Each structure stands twice: as C-alpha cells, then as structure tokens.
Image (spheres, coloured by chain):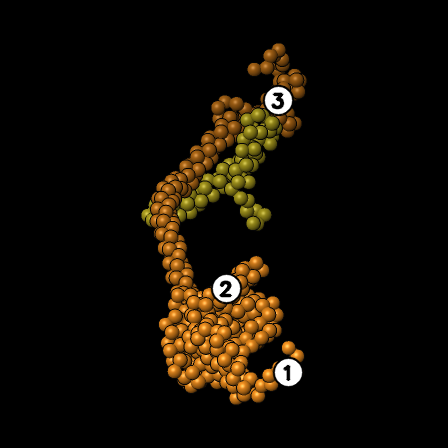
Amino acid sequence: MKKNQISFTVAFEELQEILVKIQSQEVDIDQLSEKVKRARFLIDFCEKKIKGISMEVKKVTKSLKES
Amino acid sequence: MDIKLQKTYGILELNSKVKFVLDNCFPDLFWVRGEISGFDRKSRGFTNVYFQLQEKNPNKDEVLSQVSAVIWKSDRVKIWNKLYESKIDPNFCDGREVRALCRLNTYPPYGKYSLIIKDIDPKFTLGKLAQSRERIIQTLKLNGVLDKNKKRVLVKVPLKLGLITRLNSEAYHDFLGKLKESNFAFSVQTYDSSMQGKNVETEVCKALDFFNKENLDAVIITRGGGAKTDLSWFDNQKIAEKIAFSKIPILTGIGHKTDYSIADMAAYSFYQTPTDVAIFLIKRIADFLEEVENISDKLTYSVNDYLKANLQQLRVFKERLLWTSAAYIVEQTKDLKVFKKEIVEYPELLIKNTKEKIESYRLQINNLDPVNILKKGFSITKFKNQTIKSVNQLKVDQEILTIFTDGKIKSKIINLKINKKII
C-alpha cells in the first residue's frame, strides 16, 4: 500500500478520533478548522471507499442470491 | 538157584519172550500221553508215519524219556478226519502234546518195541493248548505286556507298512490286493516268515526286530485262516512280548472267526483276515480324508457365514452412512442457506451502518465547523493575531479584530466587564 493511500479502517479510525477530540473540546480553536478540513477529507474518502466496497459486495452477493 | 544153572536164552528166544510178557502185561489198546517229536519231515501225504513220543521235564527243555511210534496209513486218514472235525490242525507237528490210544508193538528180530497209534483224544490236545495259553496270558497280564502296544500312536494316514507273512501266500495276495484296490499310495515292505510250525516264533520275532529299525507307520502280521492248533503258534509268549515292546503299532490278521491268539491280544488291534486288516487301514485313511473334507466344508461354511455377517454389517453401515450423510447434507444445506443469507445481508447491513455513521459524522463535523458556528451568530475575536478566549486577555483602548463569516471589523475597547460566571 502506498503512503498516501490509506485504508478505510485507518481513515475511519482517524475520523472517529478527530470527532471525539473536537467533541471533548480537546482541539484548540485555531486547529479546529484544520481538523474539520481533515475530517471532511476523511469523510469523503470513507464515503468513496464504502461506495466502492458496496459495489463489490453487491456484485458478489448478486451471484450468491442467484445461485 | 545158582545163577550159573539158570536158562540161557537165544536172542530171538529172548525177544520173543519179552514180546510175550509185554503183550500179556498191557491190554490190547491203552492210552499214552506225550509230545510229538521228529515228525515234520515225514508228514507229507497219507503214508505210514514214524516219529517219537517223548516226555519232557516240565521245568526244563530236557527229554526225560522217549518211545518210537507209528501211525499206519489207514489210521492216519481216520485220525486226520477226527482232528479236523474237532477243529484241531489235523496235520501233526513236533511239540504237540497228544493223548494217543496205542497198541504195543514188539518186533523180536530187532529187540525193540514201539507204539502203534490207533487214535487220538482231541479233547486232551485242546485242553493242553488251553492250559498253556492260559498260563502265558496270566504271565503277560501280570507283567502288563498286553496293553503296551495299544498305547502306541497309530497315525491317521498309515501308508508306510511292514508286512510279516509267508511270501506269495493267499494272505499275502489278499492283503496287498485289497490295498491296491484303494488307490492310496501305500508303501509296503514285506518280511517272509513262517506262519505255522515251530519256526513261527523265531522268524516272526526276527521280522519284528527288523521292522522296528525301520521308519514305519504300522506293522501287519497276517496269515490265512487255520484250525485252532494252527492258531496256537501265535499263542506264544515271545511273540506277544515282541509285539508289546514294539515301538510301531502292530496289527494282526492271523485270527479265527471265533477265537483269537495271544499275539492278537498283545497287538494294537487285531482282525480276522488279511483283507480285514487292509480294510481297516483303508478306512482309517478314508475317514481322515473325510474328516479333512468336513473341516474344509466347515471352514468354507464359516468363512461364508463370516463374509455374510460382514456384508450385512457393511450394508447396515452403508445405510447408516447414507442416512446420516443425507441428514448431514440437509443440516449443512440449512446452515448454508443461513450463511448465504447472512453473507448477502450482513455486508449490506454493515455498509448501511457505516454509511449512516459517516453521515452522522458529517453532520457532527458540520456542526463543529467554525464556519457554521459563525453562521449561527458566533464570531472570533483576535488581538495581535491571537484568538481571544477570555476578557482577561484584553484591556480598555486596545484595538481588536472581530471575524465573521462574511467579513471582519476592527474596533476599540471602551469598557471591560468581567462576569463572575462564564456562560
């Protein structure tokens, strides 16, 4: 796996981490918009990834449903 | 009377006088008992026959006294018939004890006397035979001889045989002929031996000694049937002892329809005729073969039974296997269906949940986005490019920068008021 290509799990975990930190006000207001930006990126990444996975799964389960 | 004055006899006169005295002294016919001797060589045909009658010391083989005897040709036929009817061997032989009705015969020209035998008492001969026989039997019984050969082991397939008989006799041919009929692979060694007469003892004993050195399954002593005195040659202690101490089982076929000899008693088993011995041997082998066949049949049956039982069990196993495997397949198919359903549903559910989570995170992030907060009416205050989080950071007359979503304002602090409580 390439350095800039993170996995869904790692992205999802980071997203959850950011969320928890923001919600518990551990994030400084100055860093907030950076963190939000990162979170948005991760959300988009995860969404894209889950869509891809969903497509794959549907392909597989379709053949299972038909068999 | 002075002995010198006594009468002087001429030889013939003397012999004639002796004859006269003797003839007057004995009745015309009188009984004499004695053992026959010197007879055998002259016994052929119905001619006049001369022999001796002798008396032996009962404890030793020593002749105490003997007398010449004769049977005239005419009497011999009569005596022969009488003995034959009494079932005694009508042929005289040496060693036989007889009670004879005699006439004294003196022959003056030779000065000898002899006995003319006119008749024989068969009962006496029979009695003598019986006595001697009984004596031998008692002795053998006392010494435990009679059972010894019976304790030998006769193999189940007695093929290697020793045959003691008179070569080329009827018995010889009967025995071998019967064996041949059977087609079994008998191997027979023959020892030629007298079966009657005084040589029986030595020859049969020699034959037994000879065969005892050979590797044989059984030894057969056989001869054709004969009259009772004939049989008496086998009422013999030495032969019985040889048989008893023989390492090989001895089978006898020397018998008689109504009686049996001491040799028979000492033997492993005895039969009436040579043919009977052969039949026994053949039957023993045939029985063994039958036994083998039976065992083989039984074996086949039991193997079949065993196979049947195993086959049955195999069938049961097969059915059980089919049944259980069918049940297993049903069970597995059921499980598989569940799995299939789950594998289809679970990822979808997982994706749905994840999507929902991501959506909820998006909402939360949106809510937390300072831009959106500013949109709700909040603003950010900065002094010298530092975000102000407390009134305490500021003083009156300081210029501060207030940031909104859509722009900034610069303003001067006129008044400061610190709340006791933070909202």
Q: Nearer the viewer, residue B35 or B13?
A: B13
Residue under the image location 49 percent in, 41 percent down: A45
Please say whether residue B96 is visible from this viewpoint: no
Is B60 displayed left or right of B169 in the figure? right
| Chain letter, orange | B
**Colour given to chain A in the rendered image:** yellow
Q: Nearer the viewer, residue B9 or B43?
A: B9
- Assess disc 3: are there few (<14), some (14-19) or many (≥20) residues with their C-alpha within 10 Å of its C-alpha: few
**Is B339 placed above or below B382 here?**
below
**Is B210 placed above or below B414 here?**
below
Residue beneath label 1, please?
A: B5
Subunit bearing disc 3: B
The mark lying in front, picked from 3 and 1, is: 1
Residue beneath label 2, please?
A: B131
Subunit bearing disc 2: B
Q: Earlier in the sequence, mark 1 or mark 2?
A: 1
Across and down, in percent, residue B269 comes to: 47, 65
The amino acid type, in three-letter code, at marker 1 is Leu
Label 2: which secondary element: helix
Q: Which mark is residue B125?
A: none
Residue under the image location 55 percent in, 62 percent down: B140
The mark lying in front, picked from 3 and 2, is: 2
Residue beneath label 3, please?
A: B389
Label 3: which secondary element: loop
Q: Earlier in the sequence, mark 3 or mark 2?
A: 2
Across and down, in percent, residue B357 comes to: 46, 33
Please say whether residue B78 is visible from this viewpoint: yes
